[in-house]
């Protein structure tokens, strides 16, 4: 906290009328698998300092990773000088009030030997159980992060968190046949379980082997259902929730601007932000704008409840600051009343979309891309893994009329997602 | 001289060692609807060391660069290498090495402008756009300047100092038609600092006009018909085709894992009209967008000729993988931040121009599309690729007709490349590419216009 105080006092000394400082210290130990072999052990100690100076409603931000007094003094001088020359904006402000809070999640102990043991066990397990599977890259890291926020308005926040993150990219290979790559990310508080037991990893590995023998769908173009898997839902929610965040809201191209309280999506859909979730390993206790994040609804039964605006975005647009600000993590979708099997049985024709590789959807929700690691469904049965299949539609229109949401959900430590069945996707094959 | 500082630690080198001192400095300014929503500078610097020992690497980094901290980093990297080596017991042999020194500084020779002048530049663009085009729904103007300054010293005598800046200005405009929002954008700039590219905002008004024209056309355009179509990929798209469709499958880490490219070495993988090269620093005597004169593990970079006249000739690799694959290192090992380890990355990947004329190419298509701009893209181990297409046109009976709305194209590279029947005589470089592969890193991409068959998304 001394470092934060030093930054703040330097900013005031150099002429900032208001100021805020974010400091994080991260200690990371990382072990990497490359091309199926453990090949790197990496140790990092990183500091991130973010100093913001406000002068006459003008603002400038400087970020650095140096913690010595001279570097901080020079940065404070530069940021205040640039703030003086910036543009005035009434939305450039900080929260006020005597608020002092500390947050600490249970500590995850670093165990390098266990990290190595889990990775070796993972390689052995994959070789034994999934003989044609190739681990292209895997990263197991232990992160310990301390974060501080302090401003000149009396807000002081501190959090301490630690966890393991596992990221893996893989595909299957047999003679000259190669499947599409796939990947998954898992955040966990411990290494008690084998890596193969995390999330849906073992299912995904099996699917890659299935995809050594994909087929092009015979019917070259049709309109049908699509079941989006939990792993794939994150990409879709990212785009949807972007419309609640600063850029879309401030620029005025948000689909949802000014519609709090309106039913905008299918009533089966409830999306929550849970930055302090009991269900998720990931925690995001406070924002860089000095607000404590809270768990709350974004859409409840299809009704828009909150935006994901930060303090600047809130002042700029006249709406409330969001319960959190992240469109990536801490996202929870409530389960539905159908099992995955029931959803498949209900399909006349369509696909199970396990990975979407596509361009950024247009602001109006139009999207198109390749259905990767996906399956063709006809007459209520999964038929075969597919290749060279494109899917397109309008995400907003499709989310206004959801066919089903699954009871089953996947927890990857950062999000908790069900399967979602949508109608009217255009599916085309080569 | 930062290399001299590193040389003070040479006596501490005991194994195959890299010691890198690096500073990334990034200025980012964004004006959205005239509001300065981003105005910041981010400087990240420090020391890192990577040590090779019997087939594994130990890596350590610290933002502190005093003598004691540098020695600690060297010791920690060695400790990590030995610790992992004792757990892995690989006993792989030494890595290739060569001794040379290079110094390349691309910082501007002009006087640096203030942040205020940069903000005023964006304000002038905003003012022009909104006063000229009253129906705009929103406008975004961004300046992004990244200076990467690296000093590298190795135990085997390779040493280098490079300062490689990249500056871009992005213009993004949106408008609404029939209740639907459309957007279009243009990115300008490249190798160099702000002062090297941007002086008078009036010089960019024509780009604002072009961006408006494109978003207007798109709003009045049609959805492409989904399916397998004849298309012309404009030279602006050839680079992303080179990068995503072929480049990634021929990176040695992907090859070692088993990407399809491994099976095709020495075989015909494309039309004989296709030659594809990952250039180290120069093409036709001109400096490429992301010049690499020494890579981050101390290899003198060579151009990697990946496809020559349709035959797959080579891969891009680093020292470690060149041993595994029995090839020579190409100098493709690059790291983004001081705290990142070098990975096999592309540098300036391009398809070389041919002899055809763009107009003739368009005239040769009866029913298809002329696709003029890429957005994001992705590659696959199978060589299936996709990229977003925010702008393009229908071609009917050899003529460009209506604009199309946003779409995505995809194909299997080693099939699609064989469908290429015409290659234009132009060459265009994209200067703003960022490739995400564990670490995001600037890349250059280039090429001519190409006539081929491809899968297009739509309705």
Image (spheres, helix red, strand yellow):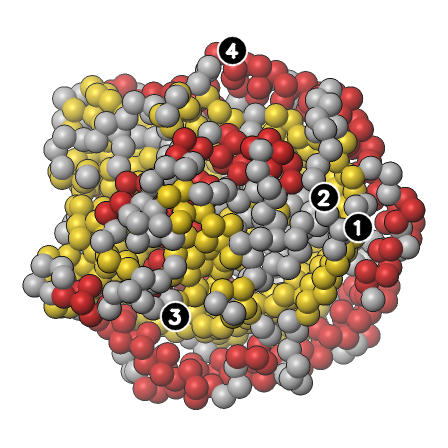
Nearer to the camera, B120 or A386: A386
Residue that carries the numbered disc 3 in the rendered image = B186
Q: Residue at x 47, y 86 (%)?
A: B201
Residue that carries the numbered disc 1 in the rendered image = B157
Q: Earlier in the sequence, mark 3 or mark 2?
A: 2
Residue that carries the numbered disc 4 in the rendered image = A128
Which mark is on residue B97?
2
Q: Within 10 Å of the Cα at label 3, are there few (<14), some (14-19), or many (20+) other Cα atoms?
A: some
Q: Is residue B449 left or right of residue B95?
A: left
Where A82 sits versus A25, above or below? below
Determine the secondary structure under disc 2: loop
Nearer to the camera, B149 or B265: B265
User: Looking at the picture, how far across and down is residue B290, in whole percent?
Assistant: 55, 62
- Residue A315 is at least partly visible in this image: no
Q: Are marks 3 and 1 in contact (CB under 8 Å)?
A: no
User: Looking at the picture, how far across and down is residue A139, in whole percent?
Assistant: 60, 33
Q: In the rendered structure, the residue with mark 4 lies on which chain? A: A
């Amino acid at each position: 906290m001394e470092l934060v105080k030093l930054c703040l006092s330097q900013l005031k000394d150099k002429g900032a009328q208001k100021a805020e400082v974010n400091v994080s210290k991260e200690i990371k130990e990382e072990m990497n698998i490359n091309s199926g072999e453990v090949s790197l052990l990496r140790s990092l100690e990183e500091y991130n300092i973010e100093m913001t100076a406000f002068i006459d409603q003008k603002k400038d931000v400087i970020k650095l990773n140096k913690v010595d007094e001279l570097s901080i003094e020079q940065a404070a001088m530069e940021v205040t000088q640039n703030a003086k020359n910036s543009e005035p904006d009434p939305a450039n402000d900080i929260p006020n009030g005597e608020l002092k809070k500390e947050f600490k999640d249970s500590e995850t102990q670093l165990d390098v030997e266990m990290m190595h043991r889990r990775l070796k066990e993972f390689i052995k397990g994959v070789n034994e159980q999934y003989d044609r599977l190739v681990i292209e890259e895997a990263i197991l890291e232990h992160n310990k992060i301390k974060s501080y926020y302090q401003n000149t308005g009396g807000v002081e926040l501190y959090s301490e968190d630690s966890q393991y993150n596992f990221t893996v990219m893989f595909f299957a290979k047999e003679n000259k046949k190669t499947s599409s790559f796939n990947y998954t990310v898992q955040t966990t508080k411990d290494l008690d379980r084998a890596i193969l037991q995390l999330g849906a990893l073992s299912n995904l590995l099996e699917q890659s082997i299935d995809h050594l023998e994909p087929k092009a769908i015979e019917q070259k173009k049709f309109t049908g259902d699509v079941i989006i898997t939990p792993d794939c839902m994150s990409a879709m929610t990212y785009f949807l929730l972007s419309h609640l965040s600063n850029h879309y809201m401030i620029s005025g191209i948000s689909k949802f601007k000014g519609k709090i309280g309106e039913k905008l999506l299918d009533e089966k859909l409830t999306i929550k932000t849970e930055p302090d979730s009991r269900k998720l390993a990931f925690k995001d206790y406070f924002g860089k704008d000095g607000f404590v994040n809270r768990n709350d609804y974004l859409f409840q039964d299809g009704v828009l409840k909150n935006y994901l605006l930060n303090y600047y975005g809130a002042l700029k647009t006249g709406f409330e600051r969001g319960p959190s600000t992240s469109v990536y993590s801490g996202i929870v979708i409530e389960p539905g009343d159908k099992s995955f099997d029931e959803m498949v049985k209900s399909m006349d024709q369509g696909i199970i979309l396990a990975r979407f590789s596509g361009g950024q959807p247009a602001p109006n929700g139009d999207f198109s891309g390749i259905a990767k690691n996906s399956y063709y469904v006809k007459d209520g049965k999964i038929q075969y893994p597919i290749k060279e299949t494109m899917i397109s539609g309008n995400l907003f229109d499709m989310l206004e009329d959801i066919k089903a949401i699954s009871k089953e959900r996947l927890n990857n430590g950062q999000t908790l997602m069900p399967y979602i069945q949508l109608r009217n996707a255009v599916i085309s094959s080569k | 001289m930062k290399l001299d500082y590193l040389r003070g630690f040479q006596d501490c080198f005991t194994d195959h060692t890299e010691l890198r001192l690096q500073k990334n400095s990034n200025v980012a300014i964004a004006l959205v609807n005239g509001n300065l929503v981003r105005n910041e500078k981010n400087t990240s610097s420090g020391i890192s060391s990577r040590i090779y020992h019997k087939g594994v690497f130990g890596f350590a980094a610290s933002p502190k660069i005093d003598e004691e901290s540098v020695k600690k980093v060297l010791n920690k990297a060695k400790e990590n290498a030995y610790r992992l080596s004792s757990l892995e017991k690989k006993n792989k042999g030494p890595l290739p090495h060569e001794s040379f020194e290079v110094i390349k500084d691309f910082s501007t020779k002009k006087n640096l402008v203030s942040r205020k002048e940069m903000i005023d530049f964006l304000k002038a663009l905003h003012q022009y756009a909104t006063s000229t085009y009253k129906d705009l729904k929103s406008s975004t103007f961004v300046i992004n300047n990244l200076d990467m300054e690296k000093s590298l010293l190795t135990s085997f005598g390779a040493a280098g100092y490079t300062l490689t800046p990249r500056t871009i200005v992005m213009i993004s405009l949106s408008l609404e038609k029939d209740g639907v929002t459309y957007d279009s954008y243009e990115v300008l700039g490249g190798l160099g600092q702000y002062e090297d590219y941007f002086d008078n905002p009036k010089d960019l008004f024509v780009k604002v006009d072009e961006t408006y024209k494109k978003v207007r056309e798109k709003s009045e355009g049609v959805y492409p018909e989904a399916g397998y179509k004849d298309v012309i990929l404009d030279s602006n798209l050839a680079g992303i085709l080179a990068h995503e469709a072929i480049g990634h499958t021929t990176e040695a880490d992907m090859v070692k894992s088993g990407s399809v490219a491994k099976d095709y070495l020495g075989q015909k993988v494309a039309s004989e009209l296709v030659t594809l090269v990952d250039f180290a620093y120069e093409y036709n005597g001109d400096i490429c967008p992301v010049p690499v004169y020494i890579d981050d593990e101390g290899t003198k970079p060579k151009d990697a000729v990946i496809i020559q006249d349709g035959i797959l000739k080579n891969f891009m690799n680093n020292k470690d993988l060149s041993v595994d694959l029995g090839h020579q290192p190409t100098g493709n090992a690059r790291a983004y931040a001081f705290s990142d380890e070098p990975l096999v990355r592309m540098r300036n990947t391009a398809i070389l121009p041919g002899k055809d004329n763009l107009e003739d190419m368009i005239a040769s298509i009866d029913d298809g599309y002329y696709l003029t701009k890429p957005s994001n893209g992705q590659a696959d181990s199978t060589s299936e690729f996709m990229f977003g297409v925010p702008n393009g046109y229908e071609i009917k009976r050899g003529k460009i007709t209506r604009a199309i709305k946003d779409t995505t194209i995809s194909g299997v590279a080693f099939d699609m490349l064989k469908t290429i029947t015409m290659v234009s005589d132009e060459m265009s470089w994209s200067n703003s590419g960022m490739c995400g592969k564990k670490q995001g890193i600037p890349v250059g991409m280039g090429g001519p216009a190409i006539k081929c068959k491809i899968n297009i998304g739509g309705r």
